[in-house]
Image (cartoon, rainbow, N blue to C red):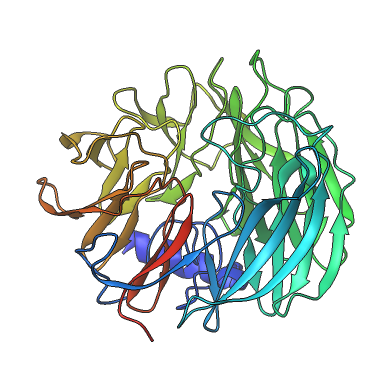
Amino acid sequence: MHRCSVIIVFLLATPMIAWTEEWSQFRGPLGNGHSQATGLPVQWTGEDNISWKQAIPGEGWSSPVIHQGQIIVTAAVPVANTEQDYSLQMLVLDGSSGEITKTVEIFRQDGSTAAKIHTKNGHSSPTPIIEGDRVYLHWGHQGTACTKTDGTIVWRNRELNYPPVHGNGGSPVIVGDRLVFSCDGGSDPFVVALDKNSGKVLWKVTRTTGASAKFSFTTPAVIEVAGKLQIISPGSGAVCAYDPADGREIWRVNYGEGYSVIPRPIFAHGLVYVCTGYGTPHLLAIRPDGSGDVTKTHVSWERQRAIPHTPSLLVVGEELYMVSDKGVASCLDAKTGKQHWQQRLSGGGGYSASPLYSEGKIYFQSETGVGNVIRATRKFELLSTNKLGERTLASYGVTQQSLLIRSDQNLYRIGKAD
């Protein structure tokens, strides 16, 4: 009952990401990896149970988002006859056929000044957000933009310069009339809110922690506590809650030298679940009703074993599910942290994609293209192991009775077509 009331309040407070059949942002309409879709496929290969496969130009690990039968992804496409310049593009695909119906260049990345990226990253990793007929696109230090769903550019902002480490990563979130994201580069990290209608900076707050390595790549979460919204944004050394109105820091939990933090926080059972990044990640369950530094007072439980560096967490009912980057999956009691089971997933390879829940099943996608489907229960039950045969780091998209999986070469629609 408590979980249902949290969801209802959250929907009323943030109608811009209300639960619909549209997959409108990173990890779905509520940003938590849950899908209401029925009949999602349980078995597939690179050739079987495939509705279509569409080659995606260039590179990028942004996840697909869906609006009224259209699929939108971003890509960084090398510009011919240049020294590693990239065209940063929005691609629109027909959901039924996979055909690319529109290509819009949003920015041009200058290869002579672009920072080096990590081997697990690309030049187009943040996932877009769709709200109404607007698409919000983000390339970290390269810029942020808004278009209409038909590709018409509404605004562009390239004012927020900072020194990236390993390229771009975290995605933005919409809070009322604000588009909020973190800019955690090699120095002077900050969190910023843009006016979603104009792209102008509404507030910008410095993130101050004791961590030596300043860079991180998280996507914020929006929660409601005692009738007020909070933006939960982890970074190197600490997770902070910010007031959407002015960026005021409400509370923080410090975690020392944790850096390169990637997983998106989630909120359930009155707790915020946060992973603390490299070198040894911890999982913290935090009560978000405090103020100031609540490191010693509001961490309900903590765990250190097999915690993900990259994939986000998943809460289903009373259980918390996760997979480490090395492929060890765990099921914990979400309220206490007690372990129900821990199991190495089939298929080998690392894990970067965040898990997906639908109809009592959980989907884990490995970097080697292997999809593991398990039953969402307190006893480990593997339902299938599915080999796509291509490298996959992006998280799932969902449209009707189909999964959308982006590989390093293609976008796949797996399952039934429209």
Which image quadrant for residue 380? top left
Q: Measuring 60% from the left and 47% from the top, which residue is drawn there? A: 125
In the image, 384 versus 324, the foreground residue is 384
Quarter occupied by the N terminus: bottom left
Eyeballing the image, is 192 above or below 209? below
Which image quadrant for residue 400? bottom left
Residue 70 is at least partly visible in this image: yes
Instruction: Measuring from the top left, give residue 104's x and y in whole percent.
Output: 75, 68
Residue 199 is at least partly visible in this image: no
Instruction: Measuring from the top left, give residue 243's x and y in whole percent.
Output: 71, 48
In the image, 156 versus 106, the foreground residue is 106
Q: Is residue 123 left or right of residue 301?
A: right
Instruction: Measuring from the top left, give residue 11's x and y in whole percent.
Output: 52, 70
In the image, 247 versus 354, the foreground residue is 354
Q: Is residue 229 left or right of residue 399?
A: right
In the image, 206 versus 348, the foreground residue is 348
Eyeballing the image, is 9 above or below 230? below
Q: Measuring 50% from the left and 67% from the top, which residue is drawn there? A: 29
Q: Is residue 215 left or right of residue 400?
A: right
